Every structure is written in structure tokens, then in C-alpha cells.
Amino acid sequence: MAYQEDRGSWFEGQGLWQHVPASDWQDWTWQLKNRITTLDQLEKLMVLTPEERRGVAFAGQKLALAITPYFFNLIDRADPNCPIRKQMIPREGEMIVSAEEKLDSLGEDEHSPVPGLVHRYPDRVLFLVTDRCAAYCRYCTRSRLVSNAQDYNFHPEYEQGLRYIESHPEVRDVLLSGGDPLLLSDRKLEHLLSRLRAIPHVEFIRIGSRIPVFLPQRITAELCEIFRKYGPIWMSIHVNHPKEATAELRDACERLSFAGVPLGNQSVLLQGVNDDPEVMKALVHRLLRMRVRPYYLYQMDLITGGSHFKVDVRKGLEIIRALRGHTTGYAIPQYVIDAPGGGGKVPMNPDYVEAMGEDAVVFRNYEGRRFEYPLKSTPVEATAETATGQAAPAEAHREPSVLKD
């Protein structure tokens, strides 16, 4: 059945937690303290499938279970195929490791000159500032690191990282990630931002966070004031399905936008979650309505135990092709593969170009119609009329040609 969306509504409310005072519900620290983190807690709230129960039992060896009450409300407890449920509740597929999968699938460790800092691209660094998240996505690229379920023993070294950035003038762009930077206290986050903003050659500061999605209550007036003070701070959030685009997330994005934070979204292409053109179209339209520009659509990284989420790259290209020409260009993310082993992000694009010659490029548009764009300019021969400023011959005003198949 084709995906159907109620475009006029935004999910909101306390769901199973109606008994909780609104003041508690809206407190992000209450949300963290009341996360669902154990099998017993889950089974009091829903009936798990045998596959999920085995997955939860294994989670302590791979990536901890944690879901905020707010985000748990989005799970359809009657549907094992719910796209939110698939992302958050462990399944036994996590126990299966394929030959091509690696703990450090992007080769971050070998590009790490000091603990917690990755310098892969010439002009920018990835600064990992925490190993904790508000909730844990089961396809997490850094599952080796976050939650410490695998005894990775990652400890952020802020001063070493800051000194490295200060001593490398080629670094103009710093991305704060982790774990999730917005789990840091306001004081710690302000310290990091103030230190980075004081470095003359750092021009661009970014934050990668799923906190607005898992914990929109964290986007407080005080936090927004910090971003305003040290801005512009750019932020990439992570929404995978239109059901995640709630009224609370919309309001959090509005607060960030009004604080001068430009917002982009990074989705991961996941089997049974968003590997459908209509689902993706509904998602990108919701994002734009929330002041968020769809930025990247990632092919899932080759993390251990992730094969049950893996989507064929041809399906990703089909989704991009289904968006192009059928929605605004602002809504179309760049589909990329983060090259295994540390090669960086490589764009994946549908084939529109058919031929490239000396004289012209031949291509198809979103409808499949063929066009030709001339690469050389051919002057029209001067005539008596053009020499005297009269109108040029009608042949000189031809419309671009449409090639017939």
C-alpha cells in the first residue's frame, strides 16, 4: 500500500505519560532520567516479538538500549514493522556480522591525530565531544564508541582537541559531534563554543545532533541564547521518517531558527523505514515546513550487525530520481556514500547525462525527454539587416532542441 500522510496534522502529546505533570514532561532532564533502558521496562509498555527480545538481550554487548519517553510515544506498539520501532528497539539481526562490516567502518581512528578529533579533510575536523546520546539508533555509525557497551573507553580530550585546532591554521571548519554534543551542559557547551570562536582561523562551526528529534525539550531559551551569542552556529539534525516530524520538533526548530541557527537534515536510508519514494517525499516536505533544508541522504555505513537495515544503492538512486522534478529543488537531499575505510563522502546521482562531446552535451530531464546543450557558440553570419541594427533572421531565434528517441 502506498504511504498515506495526513498533511494537516502534527503529532504531539504525552501519550503513555499523561499522568506526568506538564512541567516534568517539558523538562529535558526528566526525559533523560526516565528513559526506557531495560527489557523489563519495555515489556511493561509493549509486547515484544521474539526477535526483539533476543535483540534486547544482546544490546548490552553492542549498543545500549535507551529511548526517551517523548520519542517512545511515536512507536506503534501494535505494529512490529513500525519505522520508529525498527530504529530504536534492538533486533536479533544485530547479532549477525557480515564479512564487509567493520567496527570503525569509516576509518576514523586512523585519521585521529589526538583522542576525539578526526582530521580527514584538509580544511575541517570532526570533534567528538561525548560518547553519550539521548537515545541510541540501532544503525549507529559509532556504535563501537557511544554508550561504551563494547568497552571502547572513549574519553573526550577537550584541551588536546582545542590545542590541535589552534595550532593548525588550515582548519577553518569544526564539526562538533559524538555522541551528541547537545547532551553537554550549557556551561560546557558555551566553553567549547567560546574557545572555538576565539580561534582566528576557525570560520565555520557546526553541530551534528539528534537531540531536537529525541529530546526537543532540550532546545531551551538559554541554549538558544548561547547559539545567538557565538553564532552563526550551523546545525544538522537527523530525521528519517515523517512521523518523527512532530509539533514539538517543529517548535524546537523554530526556536533554533529564530536564534540564527541554519538547519539542515541528514537522513540514513534504511530498509523498512524510508526506502520508499513517497515516504521520502513526505519527509522532505515536512522538513521544509519546519525550516529545515534536506541536506544529505546517506547510504548506511558498513557497521557491524547492520545488514538488516541495508538498502540497495539502486533503490536510493530511484528515490532521488522520483524527487527530481516532482518537488522543489530545496527538498532534494544529496545522496552520498561515506566511502568505507575513510575515503570521505562521494555523491551518488542518477544518470541524466547520455553523451558529452566536443560540441554538445546530451541529457534527459526528469520526464525522460532528451535534450541537447551546445558547448560551442556559433556566430550568425552578418547580413544587411543585422549590420544596420534591424531584427535578426527568424532562424537566429530558435528554441532549444528536443531530441526524439
Image (cartoon, rainbow, N blue to C red):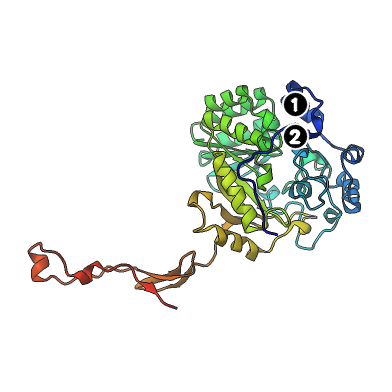
Q: Position of residue 145 (x, y in %)?
A: 76, 43
Disc 2 residue type (three-letter): Tyr
Q: Position of residue 215 (x, y in %)?
A: 70, 33
Task: In the rendered view, tell whether residue 129 sits above or below residue 48.
Answer: above
Q: Which residue in the structure is indicated by mark 1?
A: 25
Q: Position of residue 313 (x, y in %)?
A: 65, 63
Picture quarter containing residue 339? Answer: bottom right
- Given residues 184 and 341, the one toward you in this image is 184
CB of mark 1 within 8 Å of CB of mark 2? yes
Looking at the rendered structure, the secondary structure element under dot 1 is: helix
Q: Which residue in the structure is indicated by mark 2?
A: 70
- The quadrant of the picture occupied by the N terminus is bottom right
| N-terminal-most mark, 1 or 2 | 1
Specify few, some or many for label 1: CA neighbours under 10 Å numbering under 14, 14-19, or 20 or more.
many
Q: Is residue 379 left or right of residue 43?
A: left
Residue positioned 77% across, 38% down in the render: 73
Specify few, some or many for label 2: CA neighbours under 10 Å numbering under 14, 14-19, or 20 or more.
many
